[in-house]
Image (spheres, coloured by chain):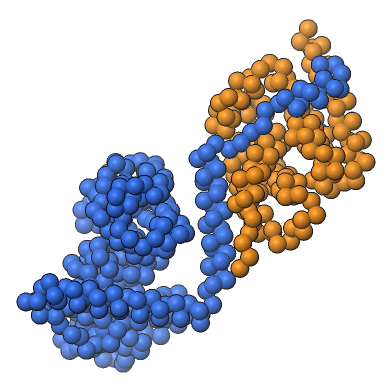
Chain colours: A blue, B orange
């Protein structure tokens, strides 16, 4: 290799490199996510998002009517309660970064943990840390016993929480830190907040179907909270032994694979009730459209669900 | 909103960018560097004027990122580290080639070059960019590329000859 031409020839013969397929996929995924975030930032002008949320609420209400209609047909013997309480709204508490569900200047509660917006049936994590806020007169509220009752449209009733009210916080006049029992059913629930056995305020909350689950895995994100065409972040909880990653396959009703992703372990904690170790995995799934789907998580299959 | 071309560029030029970074950075984090290259391109593509082909633009981003990373971390992995990690990154077919003795010697010699020589060797010699394209990546005049490349080859030859002597 002593003359330049020969060196140049050897240089040309050195190998070229490419990332492996799974690496390419990973990088592409991140590019896509970044594009999405960019678009979303542009998108989130308050007025636009208000219009969109109103649109979504309208769709939800229409859906609700539809399901109500059909379920009344099916269960004509079951009396459906028509609630008179107002629909609960999401609003921000000034000087905090908390968004609560309720009625402004009356009563509301903060829930969630992973930035979740919806309440899911039979799901307890989002309701494990609840902060209830009351507005009114601090003197009449602080130190008083409170109770939260839930009434389902089918007539089913349960007490979500009980306790004693603490003093003012942020601009609220009383508050309590507590947890709610999970809602056993999806659908429309009326939440009534009692102070000293007197109804202080009430509003309507919509509860989404329970998240899909397998023997060991439960989705922490409802498929109804995802978007179509773009990757949506999903959290999956597991009680199975420690894996660094799990495979998640999205299949259509007919069993055709539409997306296949690897979810990474992001945290581990102990369930306060069962004392079991719980593993939390995070990943992204792209739903191609609205429809009926099945997840196969680490070879375990969920039931058919809707997004 | 205007559709950006980054995904398409990723499909077309990922190999060029990865190859450049494999030789230039010696880093085991090539995937990270490739990713940063394309994410930077995503951020800045509107300022890309199309005067140079996307390939040279992307490689110059990759070069800046690798330089930044090097300055920050001062990690200059040696060839042994590189070889012990190649299984993860190097495609299987090429795996055997890089273990070829002469090529490994050449590779080692390239890594001994000062970085201004090293980059011109990678761009002109290995990636076979034209002098014009190389000038765009390095942001120098085209004439300077000829000079630089010639000096780099000379230096490379010196190193190889020294190696041969010490092996004898």
Residue B6: give x, y in percent of width and height: 63, 53
Name the quarter where the C terminus of chain B is drawn. Answer: top right
Name the quarter where the N terminus of chain B is drawn. Answer: bottom right
The residue lying at 53 percent from left, 62 percent from top is: A36
Residue B146 visible in the picture: yes
Residue A244: give x, y in percent of width and height: 39, 42
Among the 4 quarters of the image, the one containing residue B83: top right
Give the left or right position of residue B120, taking residue A73 as reference: right
Q: Say if A93 sits above or below B16 in the image.
A: below
Residue A270 visible in the picture: no
Among the 4 quarters of the image, the one containing residue A57: bottom left
Nearer to the camera, A292 or B71: A292
The residue lying at 71 percent from left, 26 percent from top is: A14
Q: Say if A127 sits above or below B142 in the image.
A: below
Residue A167: give x, y in percent of width and height: 32, 83
The residue lying at 32 percent from left, 75 percent from top is: A60
């Amino acid at each position: 290799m002593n003359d330049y031409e020969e060196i140049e020839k050897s240089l040309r013969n050195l190998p070229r490199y490419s990332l492996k397929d799974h690496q390419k996929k990973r990088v592409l995924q991140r590019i896509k996510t970044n594009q999405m975030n960019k678009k979303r930032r542009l998108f989130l002008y308050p007025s636009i998002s208000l219009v969109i949320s109103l649109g979504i609420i309208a769709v939800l209400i229409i859906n609700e009517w539809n399901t109500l209609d059909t379920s009344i047909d099916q269960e004509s013997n079951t009396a459906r309660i028509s609630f008179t309480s107002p629909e609960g709204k999401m609003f921000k508490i000034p000087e905090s970064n908390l968004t609560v569900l309720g009625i402004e200047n009356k009563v509301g509660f903060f829930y969630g943990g992973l930035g979740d917006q919806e309440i899911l049936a039979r799901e307890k994590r989002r309701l494990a840390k609840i902060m209830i806020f009351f507005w009114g007169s601090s003197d009449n509220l602080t130190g008083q016993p409170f109770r939260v009752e839930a009434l389902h449209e089918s007539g089913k009733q349960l007490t979500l929480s009980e306790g004693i009210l603490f003093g003012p916080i942020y601009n609220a006049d009383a508050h309590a830190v507590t947890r709610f029992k999970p809602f056993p059913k999806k659908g429309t629930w009326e939440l009534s907040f009692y102070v000293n056995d007197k109804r202080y305020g009430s509003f309507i909350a919509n509860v989404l179907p329970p998240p899909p689950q397998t023997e060991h895995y439960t989705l922490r994100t409802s498929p109804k909270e995802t978007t179509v065409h773009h990757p949506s972040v999903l959290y999956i909880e597991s009680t199975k032994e420690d894996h660094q990653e799990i495979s998640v396959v999205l299949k259509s009703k007919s069993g055709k694979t539409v997306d296949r992703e690897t979810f990474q372990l992001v945290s581990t904690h102990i369930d306060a009730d069962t004392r079991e170790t719980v593993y939390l995995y995070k990943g992204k799934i792209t739903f191609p459209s609205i429809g009926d789907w099945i997840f196969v998580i680490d070879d375990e299959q969920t039931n058919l669900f809707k997004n | 909103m205007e559709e950006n071309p980054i995904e398409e560029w990723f499909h077309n030029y990922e190999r060029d960018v990865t190859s450049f970074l494999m030789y230039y950075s010696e880093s085991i984090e090539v995937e990270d560097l490739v990713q940063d290259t394309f994410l930077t391109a995503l951020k800045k593509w509107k300022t890309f004027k199309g005067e140079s082909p996307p390939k040279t633009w992307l490689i110059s981003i990759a070069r800046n990122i690798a330089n930044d990373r090097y300055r920050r971390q001062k990690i200059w992995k040696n060839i042994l580290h590189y070889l012990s990690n190649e299984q993860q990154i190097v495609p299987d077919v090429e795996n055997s080639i890089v273990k070829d003795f002469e090529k490994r010697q050449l590779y080692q010699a390239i890594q001994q070059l000062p970085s201004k020589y090293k980059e011109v060797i990678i761009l002109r010699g290995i990636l076979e960019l034209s002098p014009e394209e190389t000038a765009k990546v390095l942001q120098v005049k085209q004439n300077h590329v000829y000079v630089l490349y010639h000096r780099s080859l000379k230096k490379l030859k010196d190193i190889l000859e020294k190696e041969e002597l010490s092996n004898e």
